[in-house]
Image (tube, rainbow, N blue to C red):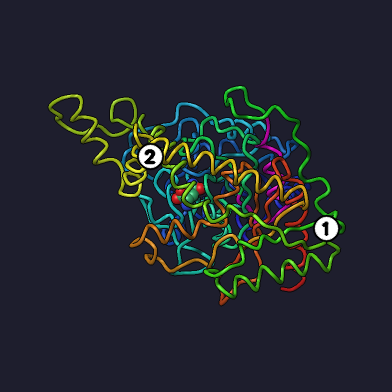
Amino acid sequence: MSLASQSLCSLKRQLQSGEISSRDIVEDVIDQIESRNQSIGAFLSFDAKSALEAAQHADLSLPLGGLPIGIKDNINVNGEPCTCGSKFLENAYTAPYDATAIQKLRQAGAIPFGRANLDEFAMGSSTENSALQITQNPSAPGHIPGGSSGGSAAAVAGNLIPATLGSDTGGSIRQPASHCGVVGLKPSYGRVSRYGLVAFGSSLDQIGPLTHTVEDSALLLNAIAGFDPRDSTSLNEKVPDYTEGLDQGVAGLKLGLPKEYFTEGIDSGVRERIETAAKTLEAQGAELVEISLPHTEYAIATYYIIAPAEASSNLSRFDGVRYGNRSENPQDMLELYNQSRAKGFGSEVKRRIILGTYVLSSGYYDAYYLRAQKVRTLIRQDFQNAFEKVDAILTPVAPEPAPKMGSATEDPLKHYLADIFTLSANLAGICGISVPLSPLNNLPVGLQILGPHLGEKTILRCARSIEISQTSVD
Ligand code: GLN
């Protein structure tokens, strides 16, 4: 078993006993990427030299001492490119600083390594919107890896690196994790600093881990969570030890099954997997409760107003002057902006900017943006009501397993609709995790466990119970 394919916890034990060195791991990661990344396409680039150097000085007494972690290419790592999967930033921007999550990784001893592919500016669910590279699903050849953190999920599923960071605005960690068969956690809004994450939807974005195991997910969350004065939405709340109590089991927990999530449109095999997982948890002492999240049907419309609105504002900084490739020979300033943006952005990003500008424009603001904000409050209240009755909520991550490559790009709306199970968590600011169940016709299927705001410990504990039951099935 290659070192790159192992869990962080297992590598940590081997490092501490002296069986292996950090350099051994980093060298293996480099070997794996050099020999197989060309076919998987998970990484856009990597800096072998600085990683090997960092491995040389690794402090193994730290929680992530000497462990390489892959980074989605929309999170700034000092001295490395940060393309956001866009032609606009390709060869045009080198990060001049570390994002707070990266700084925290380094403080925990980890080695940020490589730039993982993504849908351009994290807009999409297949990684096919990357302007730079195709990413394959290593667990399901010929199928999309999901997105937008498709490179981060494929890097772990393809055993190129033990763990990665992704970002989740409407499902971009959980959905690729589900499609690739790895564990993906979206922390509660404010739990992890967004400083240094290239903003998409600032009221929705969170950075989180993609890993082989639930324990690794907890270990990484320990490192990146916590208050940051440089992010005004970061929470000044104590960070518990997420690895503690993972094996407590689910006895006594109340788990909700939202009736609106189990209607038509969901693949019968996926539905059956989720129901079996729920029964497994029931057999372990959890109580299953039918709940209602009555505003679920408005989540897609609400998200696809709010996220593009925020994106249209956030992306205005890419003008070819301060950031991004500049058009050649413009006649005047306006032409410089127009041409740089027309050339730099791909079609999905343009679609979102146009949508977002429209819903914010005077005359339409009240009808769209303001109304969407009100519905967002109702969606948040749905969850608040539900969490008065239950400790966590069980749902599918996606209505079907990973579609074939190319099948979704023709119809963006179909793509948007498939986000139905993940968007609400971002609108409500709550946490969620995707944990692998047994595959369906060789295609991975994830279970989503949603928890209340700052309820990460509970969802990790439930996910761990599922993970143990899966291992015993295999
Ligand atoms: N699929 C959603 C979108 O396209 C979510 C993306 C994300 O979470 N970054 O907006």
SS under mark 2: helix
Magenta segment, principal secondary structure?
helix
- The percent coordinates of residue 129 (x first, y second) are 38, 52
- The percent coordinates of residue 82 (x first, y second) are 43, 37
Residue bearing mark 2: 359
- Residue at image point 32% right, 33% down: 324
Question: Is residue 269 shown above or below 64?
Answer: below
Specify the label residue 250 is tagged with: 1
Q: Quadrant of the N terminus?
A: bottom right
Question: Where, by quadrant of the figure, is residue 158 drawn?
Answer: bottom right
Circle 2: residue type:
Val
SS under mark 1: loop
Comes first in the chain, label 2 or label 1: 1
- The percent coordinates of residue 231 (x first, y second) are 57, 26
Circle 1: residue type:
Val
**Residue 220 in view (yes/no):** yes
